[in-house]
Amino acid sequence: MSYYVTTPIYYVNAEPHLGHAYTTIAADILARHMRQRGEDVFFLTGTDEHGEPVAQAAERLGVGPRELADKNSERFRDLVQRINATNDFFIRTSDPEHEAKVQEVVQKIHDNGYVFEGTYEGYYCPRCADFKTDAELVDGNKCAIHLIELEREKEDNWFFQLSAFQEPLEKLYADNPQWVTPESRYNEALSFIKQGLNDISLSRARLRWGVPVPWDESQVIYVWIDALLNYYTALSYARPGEDLTDRYWPARHLIGKDILKFHAVIWPAMLMAAGIEVPKSIFIHGYLLMDEHKMSKSLGNVIDPFEVMDRFGTDTLRYYIFREVRFGNDGSISAAGFEERYNSELANEYGNLASRSLAMIGRYRDGVVPDATPAELDELRGLPGRVSERLDAVDLTGALEEIWEAVRRLNRYVQDEEPWKLAKDEANAQRIDQILYSLAEGLRSVSVLLSAYMPDTADRLLQALGQPDLGLDSAEYGARPGGAQVGDLAPLFPRIETAAA
Ligand SMILES: [Zn+2]
């Protein structure tokens, strides 16, 4: 089975921020998990580079748009590395291979009869060098960015006959209730379609920084059409000399709620018009809001994701944002919330459990995991299956909750059994064997499952347990016999030193 997951491509003029990291980490968690299941995974991210804002910014700086795009695209590549994403390719819409493929698909839409010549009329901002939609106007007819009065202007350009796909789109939604999730977003997209679709511009006449319309080189393809096609074009050239389209298409998209209409309405219509299969699914997540009222002793009152990664490691951010806010909903994150979960969950519940267990295996069994029957711990039984099921539904927070229930069960288990008391009497040897084996197996199982979220941490612990295999088929608690030699483990999550004296 193949599994093709994408993030939106990020506009190069933006500063890389937590929102970009959020979607990319989510896609990475899914990609890593699916690889652990033995799926044939392809994970795509990249940058959106055409359009007037880039051309104008370049002009102000006295450089060419290409040069500016090169420089800015690099910042997103850095971000992807910094959050430890395992993308298989990084697409740039200024790649010549992408541009050629965009022309090919747009030509197909044209040849299939869904393109016509028309006149675009609207308020035009000469400083933005772009037409404004009503939503982009303030105080009647002023540019929301430049606050200058705009004139209505006309431009002859090419149109895509979106209205022809009213019925096919309604049918797509009716036949595939899981096509867009969560359900509230499905309903939102469908009601937009049911209001009636208007045809949209497919090209711009005034812009130069873009992909030329193949049958009319005086115009460039509208930047959104160019950008959406990245998901499809990337497969044709991501691996030199190979076309991966048949192997991986259609894609599963992860997007933020602000770009729902483009992805859930215009994009499938474009693909239908070109005779290409529509995406497998679209998952829409909410926003991470910063709660600046909850002070933390070590981080102050504003949580800076880059500072968190620098000081506490990338894994802690990858864990916190999916633990704190249910993926799919809007929710608040805060410096205090981070510190609380770091100390109580990561350092205490998981980190301590790991160091205690390894220390006891060292002290009572010379560092070799004994062989025994695993203790009955319901939260551990069948855990890999439950986590997989949640991740199949893109429930990243739910999967993490399942794993954490198991971590907490292991903590209760060791507290209830008190092996340090039992160890005083040789008669308890068999019981000690079972406790130590159950702890080692429990830690192994949760760590294999956590490795999609916290790859470095899980790797360190699994190495220390002498069980580095990440395959999900042997992740079940009790699936491995004893006998492994355990190693040393430095604290996984050193306690936060508070800055205040
Ligand atoms: Zn403007």
Image (cartoon, rainbow, N blue to C red):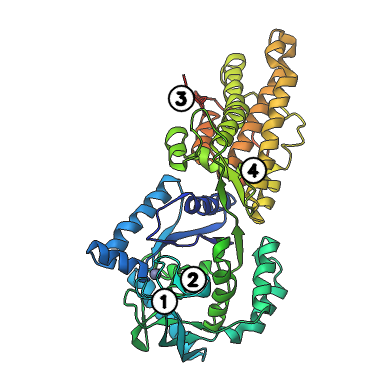
- Residue type, label 2: Leu
Considering only vertical position in the picture, is 72 above or below 451? below
Mark 4, other Cα within 10 Å: few <14 / some 14–19 / many ≥20 = many
Q: Which residue is mark 2?
A: 137
- Residue type, label 1: Leu
* First in residue order: circle 4 vs circle 3: 4
Q: Position of residue 198 (x, y in %)?
A: 58, 83
Q: Which residue is mark 3?
A: 499
> In 3D space, how far apart are the residues under numbered discs 3 and 1 (Cα atoms)?
52 Å
Do labels 3 and 1 touch, CB within 8 Å? Answer: no
Q: Is mark 1 within 8 Å of ligand 1?
A: yes
Q: Which residue is mark 4?
A: 400
> In 3D space, how far apart are the residues under numbered discs 1 and 4 (Cα atoms)?
50 Å
The residue lying at 70 percent from left, 22 percent from top is 414
- Residue type, label 3: Ala
* First in residue order: circle 1 vs circle 4: 1
* First in residue order: circle 2 vs circle 3: 2
How many numbered marks are there? 4
Badge 3 element? loop
* First in residue order: circle 4 vs circle 2: 2
The N terminus lies in quadrant: bottom right
